Image (cartoon, rainbow, N blue to C red):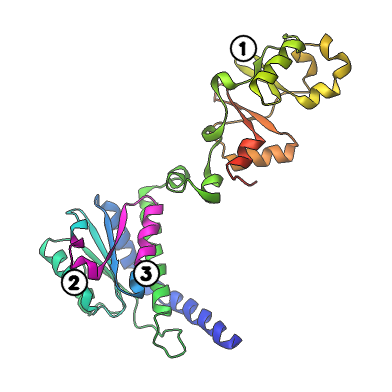
Amino acid sequence: MADIVESVLRNEAQALLSVVDRTSSSLVRAATLINGSTGTLIVSGVGKSGHVGRKIASTFCSLGKRAAFLHAAEASHGDLGIIDNDSIVLVLSNSGETPELSDLLAYCREYSIPIIGITASASSTLGKASEIVVEIGKLEEACVNGLAPTTSTTVALAVGDAIAVGVSHLSGIEPEDFRRFHPGGKLGASLLTVNDIMHSGTSLPMVRPEMPMQEVVVIMSEKGFGTAIVCEGEIPTGIITDGDMRRNVERLWQSCAMDLLLGPPKIVSPNTTVKTALQEMNEGGITCVAVADDNGELVGLLHIHDCLSCGAEA
């Protein structure tokens, strides 16, 4: 059994490498065409190619290109209306002769909708109907009988990924753009910035350096962070925590805020990722950081609990 499963992986890996040179120029042309379009990218296929097409459409959406999957059979029953005048249609069919594609191909021909075909042969019906053909060639399926779509679907999926990543490169997508499309889960949490979850405005426990500790304690209690940020004007100069007060309990009521400071506070930018801020807090053994703008002025407070509650991991 081990030799069987290992051969599947080797077969598919070799197939991927074999199409690199064959498809490189057409992949570049396909990515350029899609990037230049303003309409929705329509991805279509039937059977296993349809399943692969759904994933490819989803990948494009993740990378900021509006895309939708159109089942070729449903296209013949009203769903052709999803295609607009500015659309590009990306069609997957290993044989290039799938009967269900006929109405879709005819529609695109009649209304001059560009087709990008991912298929084994440029001389197939799909290949001939396509403005750009990504010809992956005749591939040996990894199935023990050489019949079930395995190697061919793996290659088609990788080809779709290559086009999608190429489009994202041409469009200049940035991490913050990617985060907009992935707000949930650990992926979304890892891309959150401090600005997204920090406390700001009247919720900040700001105190003056000369403020008596009796007043500082009241503000810390009101704001509920167990922390006070000492500021000279709008510039944070230190942070007082519950632990600082416990360590100075014998002189606490004779002290003012500046007397308890151990040094300048840890400060992060609002654009720092939450993951990075959490890592800095863990490394420094602290539970909160001040957030300052480019002028060094206080704009927020980030507590370690805020990072953990949104699912961030250092």
Q: Is residue 167 visible?
A: yes
Q: Is residue 95 left or right of residue 159?
A: left
Three-letter amino acid code at the position of disc 2? Ala
Three-letter amino acid code at the position of disc 1? Gly
Q: Residue at x 23, y 67 (%)?
A: 74
Residue of label 1: 233
Q: Which badge, 1 or 3, is on the more N-terminal residue?
A: 3
Q: From which residue to which does the magenta span run?
A: 53-80
Near mark 2 (Cα within 10 A), the count class, few <14, some 14-19 or many ≥20, is: many
Q: Quadrant of residue 85?
A: bottom left
Near mark 1 (Cα within 10 A), the count class, few <14, some 14-19 or many ≥20, is: few
As helix, strand or loop, the secondary structure at mark 1 comes to loop
x and y percent of residue 134 in the render? Answer: 31, 71
Residue of label 2: 129
- Is residue 10 found inside the magenta-colored segment of the image? no
**Discs 2, 1 touching: Cβ within 8 Å:** no
As helix, strand or loop, the secondary structure at mark 2 comes to helix
- Is residue 75 found inside the magenta-colored segment of the image? yes
**Discs 1, 3 touching: Cβ within 8 Å:** no
Q: Is residue 190 above or below residue 31?
A: above
Q: Is residue 62 above or below residue 135?
A: above
Q: Which badge, 3 or 2, is on the more N-terminal residue?
A: 3
Residue of label 3: 51
Q: Residue at x 32, y 59 (%)?
A: 31
